[in-house]
Image (cartoon, coloured by chain):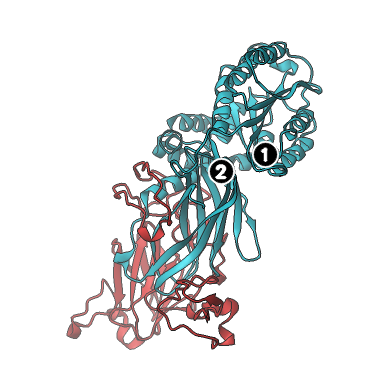
Amino acid sequence: MAGELNVQTTLSRSTVPVMTVEQLVYCLLEMRPAEGGVAGPALPLNLCLALDRSGSMKGAKIDNLRDATMLVLDMLQPQDYISVVFFSSRAEVAFPLQQIRDEARRAELKSLVSRLHADGGTNMAAAMEAGLIELRKQMGAGSLGAGNPTGYVHRLVLLTDGITEKEKRCLEQADQAAQINVPITALGIGADWNDKLMQAIGVRSGGDSDYIASAESIRTHFARTVQQMQAVALQRGIMAVRPALGIEVRSIYRVVPLISRLEPARAVDRSCSVTLGDVDRDTGQTLLVEVVVPSRPPGSYRIAQVTVEYDVPQSGLTAQQTSMDVLLEYSQDPAAIPAPDPRVMNIVEKVSAFKLQTRALEDLEAGNVRAATQKLQGALTHLLNQGDNELARIVQNELSNLEKGRTISPEGRKTIRFESGKTVRLKKSET
Amino acid sequence: MTIYCPNCGASLPDGVAFCDSCGNPVRGQQQQTLVAQSSSYGPSHEAGTPYAASAQGATGSGAVSCPVCGAAALPGEAFCDNCGAALLPTYSNAPIQAPPSTLASQSAPVPQQTPPWTGSYAPAAPQQTASLVITNPAPPATLSVPDRPELIVGRSDPQSNSYPDVDLGPYGGLDMGVSRRHFRLSHTGNQFYIEDLNSINGTIINGQRIPPHNLHPIRPGDRIALGKMEVTFEIG
């Protein structure tokens, strides 16, 4: 029936001038579950927490981690499944995947968590492997029958404060997680963990990643993750855009809930598809597609067809589709060319700031301080314009660090890497 | 009944409004049944757009360049990917527009929370003066271009009451084949465009004739031929 999802496309300009060369047009693609379109209670969760208890976690970090894990146990409903894996030099399953059917069981699991103590090294890959083994127990048990991962909202939450052994194996586990539709929320705390690795784990698994600046915030991050899982309405979302001949999709960025560059799979028929995964009932997802359009005579053209496919587990529906045409007008009349749509341009500016910060970190890694400085200066002006004063202040500090010592602080690097995807307006008004 | 796209020749189900392959409008046009020329199949669809610029390349070799750092960009691109400079004019007071109805989906519109567009404070491109340097006929002469969003370049002709903003008449414009209204010069920020106004002898930029009434981006150093007259575009 496909009425569960509203999809709307808005171009930066609905009419472009007739030119002799190619032009760039931005297409905002907003997808939100229809109000009342997805009925029924929240989907059951299938959650595993894989938590670092290495020696460096001693003190406030391990205490807060214990509290935050208890909070998660309190937030779960009787139909939800949970498992906890601790890791140091090796991984140990604190308790296997199970439901919290009554308060006695909840108290029992809490007492297992209360024994959490810090010592040993950091072997995250082993914990990821153990976590995925636990989550697989509830795969294919959803409302859509065996083999279909939908019906449960799966997630592996990973938290570490150190540099792990066997990074390559961690990435392999992230790929495995993606294959079985388990997004990973990769969280790092403190200053001494590999932010690039954790970001890659989030991206490759179809999940997310974040930097926890203070131990007291672990609770907030855990609670937010559980709330996000409970808000999932549609699953296995895929967006495909099929450009007309001569039109090129240059790039696709997800902008809501967080900004990230998506790597579309490109098919022979020019279609570009990206995985949306789980779609939240409140915020949905928004993408920004950069489209390169060729020279054309005046007239109205269909530049692309957009199709969004998804499952509605509450209704037992799979592969529902919503499709639409994206039309563009070419005109030789200057008066017919509208000013760019301000709403689209706001998002374009946010994405520009994100791109500049991401690429500045890449430049720094390659030792190109001059290029990184130029990009961060560009990002700073966008951030100030967008009212993201907090991140702007951090970028400004790191710019003076670059000037003094040709390097930025580990905390600054982590903040820029993870905060650049969340800008003030997206956080306050668009999510 | 199967119909064929008049532009690219793709076979289409009857009743479609746009070609499935090239996106050209089909409805309301002469629908061709089984008579499409073989030469109009496939990628040669751009035969209908004689000056298609596919050779310009979509990425990495943009048609315009960032006025601050010089990185390549495409017309319509809002910000430079390299330094973040704003490539389009500031829209500080642009009204918030509803999405055009032609672009909306068939579904109910998504509720919108439109944050105001407060304009860009991205590194502003320094506003520089543009000029046209006549290189043929000799001797060279430099004509500064008034700072206006758009102006006409041609030759004056009092008889027809034609007075272009930049007058090439005193430099032998008539004898060299310059039209009264030869081309329009416009700009957004520091990016300039030329639009040939259907001049008799046409406008040739760096050896390539541009079609009339199409905007063509130009860069400093570009050679522009108006008939036999040659000028070079300069900024700064």
Are discs 1 and 2 less than 8 Å apart at CB? Answer: no
Chain cyan in the figure, letter: A
Q: Which residue is mark 1?
A: A200
Q: Three-letter amino acid code at disc 1?
A: Ala
- The structure residue drawn at horizontal position 47% and vertical position 71%, both measured from the top left corner, is B18
Q: Which residue is mark 2?
A: A315
SS at mark 1? helix
Whether discs 1 and 2 lie on one chain: the answer is yes
> Toward which corner of the image does residue A20 lie, by quadrant?
bottom left
Q: Is residue A196 above or below residue A59?
A: below
Whether residue A58 appears in this view of the structure is no
Rendered location of residue B164, percent (x, y)? 25, 74
Rendered location of residue B42, percent (x, y)? 59, 78
Position of residue B169 in the picture relative to residue B23 (left or right)? left
| Label 1 or label 2, whichever comes before in sequence order | 1
Q: Three-letter amino acid code at disc 2?
A: Ser
Q: Chain of mark 2?
A: A
Position of residue A98 in the picture relative to residue A43 (left or right)? right
Residue situated in front as seen by the camera: B140 or A322: A322
- Spatial separation of the CA atoms under disc 1 and disc 2: 34 Å
Name the residue at the right extreme: A90
Residue situated in front as seen by the camera: B190 or B42: B42
